[in-house]
Amino acid sequence: MVSKVLKWVTGGMEAFLGIPIIGASIIIGFLWTPLIVMLILHIVTLVFSLKEDSEIAPSILGIVTSCVGWIPFVGMTLHIITAILLMISASKKDPAQQS
């Protein structure tokens, strides 16, 4: 359950950072600190996803995105893709709740 909430939060933040001019302005304006914050959040999400036996691929992509997010168009594209995958993963039903 915690991993699902973290995926929604990190997905929303990634979507915001993926907005072309706004996201880049925030990342550059705060001297790339948002990428470090997102890296930490993605690692935390990954740990909770592993504990809850949830999908881990979106969190791993988020870690990669945080590491290469400083590259202008590559970063924007990866932020958007990561946001989509995190939100899709967060919206899926848990296997324990399906029965």
Image (cartoon, grey):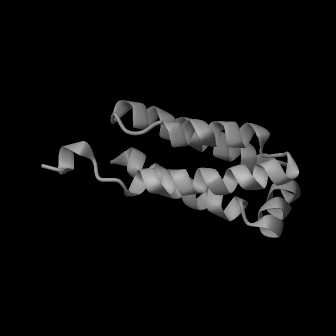
Residue at the image position 28 percent from the left and 47 percent from the top = 94
Taking the image as shown, residue 16 lies to the left or right of residue 93, namely: right
Taking the image as shown, residue 6 lies to the left or right of residue 11, namely: left
Q: How many marks?
A: 0
Q: Is residue 85 visible?
A: yes
Residue at the image position 57 percent from the left and 61 percent from the top = 12
Snapshot quadrant of residue 3 = top left
Residue at the image position 49 percent from the left and 35 percent from the top = 46
> Does residue 82 sit above or below 54 in this rendering?
below
> Does residue 40 sit above or below 78 in this rendering?
above
Residue at the image position 51 percent from the left and 37 percent from the top = 57
Q: Position of residue 83 (x, y in %)?
A: 59, 55
Snapshot quadrant of residue 88 = bottom left
Q: Position of residue 82 (x, y in %)?
A: 61, 50
Q: Position of residue 52 (x, y in %)?
A: 33, 36
Q: In the image as oriented, which residue stretches furthest toward the left?
A: 99
Q: Is residue 40 visible?
A: no
